[in-house]
Amino acid sequence: MKIPARVLSLIILFALVFSGICGCSGNVADTTDGTTDAVTQTDTESETEEEMDVPQIVLIDGQSVKISVTCDSDAYPNAAGKLASALEVRYGCTVPQTPGSAEISVVFKKSGTRDDWSITADRESVIFASGSGVAATAAVEAFLRLYTFGTDMTLSVPEGEVLSYNYARDKIDNSGYLSYIPSSEVSLIDTNGKGKIMSPEWIDSLIIVELRPLTASIGGQLRNSYDLLDFYAEAGVNCVWLTPIYEYGPGGNGYGNTGVHRIGENLTGTSDQERGWEEMRKFVDHAHEKGIYVLFDVITWGVMKGTELTKSHPDWFSGEAWGNDAFNWKNEELKEWFTQRCVENIMKTGADGFRCDCEPNYTGYALFEDVRQRLADQGKYVIIISEDGSDRRRTYDFEQDGVLWYAVKDRGGVYSDPLVWYVDGGLDIVESVKTGKGLGAASVQNTKKAGSAKYYTNCITNHDYQRRIVKGNRLRIGYAAITAPFIPLWYMGDEFNCTWQPAVQYDITVQYEDAEKPSNRRFLEDVKRMIAVRRTYKDIFEYWPDDHRKTNVCAVQVAQDTGLTAYARYAGNKAVLILPNNNEAADPYLTATVPLAECGIDGFSKYRLTDLWSGEELCVLDRQSVEELSTYVPYESFAMILIEGIE
């Protein structure tokens, strides 16, 4: 995004650019080691007198409306209508939409490439030029967020270029935030406060995506799936949970397989087991080079009928599970064999842990506790995730579904009829965190221990879901997970709103080409921006108290009925307001009362406010003025506003 010369000297070089969004009124609020594209800067570092005195063009002054909003050759009427409607709400006026009916014409024009847009102004016109309807809408939302913030009843813009976005220049790359910490250098965290679960420090930074390379259009066999890792590194995802890597066998699909000792030829491209495990090692090595941790999905219920394992060790099996041969976990020889194979899987490949299907319902806690300890004895520190809820006393760092309100729906109910609990499921996000409502294992949700563990995921989707639920909704993936006090977890493709079918998602190919469609690309850039914010402000978004109920979150009062609870996350002299709009009929301008005391930042006389979608400074306010603010928030999205105490 290009910014006019009068403000370029105010922009810190790391400024992160949200898909089409960058403003004209200041700088980003903090420094970062990330490599998200910076705002293009001119050769001149300091402003000239002429630049400091750029004329302002008044568009609305109280009830005096000097503009009309029109479209050139029917260009983007929806975006034009969105702008006019929002301005009428904000300023309490009528904005004419007839050409020549006002002193200044705001005109929407088709111009440039598909994803790009610009806004320029002179004394007679303000031109919104863009290459598509999606880009035109992005331009409108950027303009409204940055130029109509606050309560001033005058709307003015600088003469010349107001705002611009160029995808080739401004595309976000979050890979610079990621780094792999080898076990030889890692510090350990006492996850349950009793020394029973010692987690590697990188657990604090996890954003997890579940991957099935075989059904990813830019994946397939491991040797063809490196681009998949590169894609997620650019997004800022630092952990992938691989669906089962094991040999399927007749009738198997991975979750039914021939055993934990055999890797699948369909994944490795070779029937030679040693070469197959080496292919996995290379894949894991590439992931680590990108700063991504890798988890294997391990199956403990049994194996497919008629496998070599059942023939050679019939005493290891008893009865059936999922229509196939069930392991007999009373057999000590089986336990030892399985434990050794799990340890070997990690040591051979360098992978970083396990997601344990159906656990702790089959092996309980002792087996994977032993796996963890044997790996630690060899200097390898991992995380181990249970699918079902665990008691957190030992073994499992956290469960797959940290947020699951069993009083309303069990896991199967969510899979068949998906919802996001904090958007669609009736759970208040702040109440849930503070009381433990809907968190953790079903066995503890109605006890004093509810929500008292250190880490919880918010699993938005996974391979078992029978339809997609995110579908381009920024609230479901952002407000409920990425900016929330949880470890975000979702199934591949949700980050760009992939095409889907109503069936178990595990079996459906994810078309990564969908990410190139205009609306999908914009959504992906939005998700990347959310992740960039989370990773930039680690002290706020990666804060994990021993008791999750003491998390740094509080409710924010909003005057309008938005359908969801607004919240703030905070640390030190900073707070980030997350203001959602889930009410299509609501006023898009939300008025929020800032909880300065609850955020621990009430002791300052001046505050800097920054729009975190663009990284642009909005204003500096005194103590009294900052207590209430008004900002534009489109439907199914949310505001991210940083408030810093500076004096």
Image (tube, helix red, strand yellow):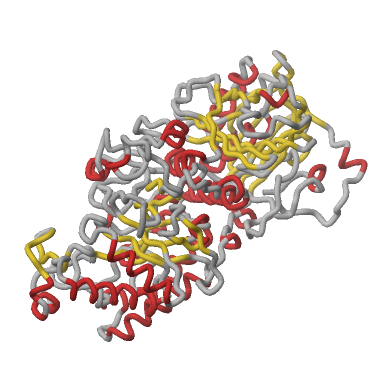
- Residue 24: % across, % down: 73, 40
Which of the two residues, 636 or 91, is positioned nearer the viewer here? 636
Q: Is residue 217 visible?
A: yes
At x 50% / y 36%, what residue is drawn?
637
Q: Is residue 114 visible?
A: no
Query: Which residue is outermost to the right?
Result: 49
Q: How many marks?
A: 0
- Residue 346: % across, % down: 37, 74
Compared with residue 552, is residue 88 higher up or lower down, i.e. above or below? above
At x 45% / y 40%, what residue is drawn?
480
Q: Is residue 158 left or right of residue 354?
A: right
- Residue 115: % across, % down: 56, 49
At x 26% / y 44%, what residue is drawn?
411
**Residue 102, image quadrant:** top right
Q: Is residue 163 left or right of residue 210?
A: right
Which of the two residues, 118 or 331, is positioned nearer the viewer here? 331
Query: Which residue is outermost to the front?
Result: 194
Q: Is residue 436 left or right of residue 20?
A: left
Compared with residue 291, is residue 38 higher up or lower down, i.e. above or below? above
Which of the two residues, 549 or 521, is positioned nearer the viewer here? 549
Compared with residue 489, is residue 307 higher up or lower down, i.e. above or below? below
Query: Which residue is outermost to the top?
Result: 63
**Residue 261, image quadrant:** bottom left
At x 66% / y 19%, what residue is drawn?
101
**Residue 578, image quadrant:** top right
Compared with residue 294, is residue 448 higher up or lower down, i.e. above or below? above
Which of the two residues, 485 or 414, is positioned nearer the viewer here? 485
- Residue 180: % across, % down: 53, 68
Where is the C terminus found, in terms of image quarters? top right
